[in-house]
Image (spheres, rainbow, N blue to C red):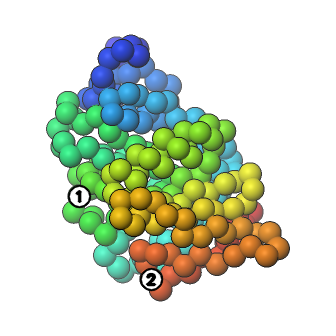
Amino acid sequence: MGKSINEMETYTYADLKKLDSAEGEHWELVNGTPYLQARPSYRHQEIAGNLFFVFKQYLKGKKCTVHQESEVNLSPAKEEDEIITLVVPDLFITCHPEKIDGQKFNGVPELIIEILSKDYRKDRWRNFNLYRDAGVKEYWIVDQYRNSVDVFVLRDGEFKLHGYYGLGEGEENIIRVNILEDLEVHVSDIFAQ
């Protein structure tokens, strides 16, 4: 039998596995506080699939790998009863596949991509600060409602806006991936239906 959440308690990855949840629900853990993730919309899944395809094709035969909706342990701890920060980004790229233990990635990915959901503040600010503090080199925020992408690059411990990309007239529409220097992603490929 699972357990329910007590807002005053600090949770670990081991506790998350015991929570009552419906099939398909995903939980994230930030500094010991569990957060239930909304189920992605059809459009959200479509955009994630488009991005996964672009990166998977490019990374074929290379050391770096792309992962979709996989658990990432940002805690330095490796034991389930000590992990207090575990996220499930929409996509991430790592050049350290040896840090994947079969269930989760233990470490800081080079690139994380989040597609904005209805819970805009969580995606925009909590994850922004969390990923910055963890040392993620590149962070994309994909806005499915505006068909735009904000790309941030970590410099001197802070995320700096690398570029704003969109489908609108006068907007940049080719993203040059900072961590993969020779890859260009067309915004139209991200939002293709």
Q: In the image as oriented, which residue stretches furthest toward the right?
A: 169
Residue occupying the point 79% across, 76% down? 170
Q: Disc 1 marks which amino acid?
A: Lys
Residue occupying the point 27% across, 29% down? 12
Q: Disc 2 marks which amino acid?
A: Glu
**Residue under pointer 1:** 99
Residue occupying the point 69% across, 62% down? 148
Q: Quick one: label 2, few (<14), some, or many (20+) residues within 10 Å?
A: few
Is any atom of residue 138 visible in this view? no
Asked which quadrant contains residue 189, the reply is: bottom right
**Residue under pointer 2:** 181
Front position in the image: 19 or 167 = 167
Mark whose residue sits in front, 2 or 1: 2
Q: Quick one: label 1, few (<14), some, or many (20+) residues within 10 Å?
A: some
- Say left or right for 80 vs 34: left
Front position in the image: 8 or 186 = 8
Q: Position of residue 27 (x, y in %)?
A: 44, 33
Asked which quadrant contains residue 28, the reply is: top left
In the rendered image, the quadrant that contains the N terminus is top left
Residue occupying the point 63% across, 62% down? 149
Check the image and report above or below for 62 versus 41. Answer: below
Q: Position of residue 109 (x, y in %)?
A: 35, 60
Q: Dot 1 lies on which element?
A: helix
Q: Position of residue 13 (x, y in %)?
A: 29, 33
Q: Dot 2 lies on which element?
A: loop
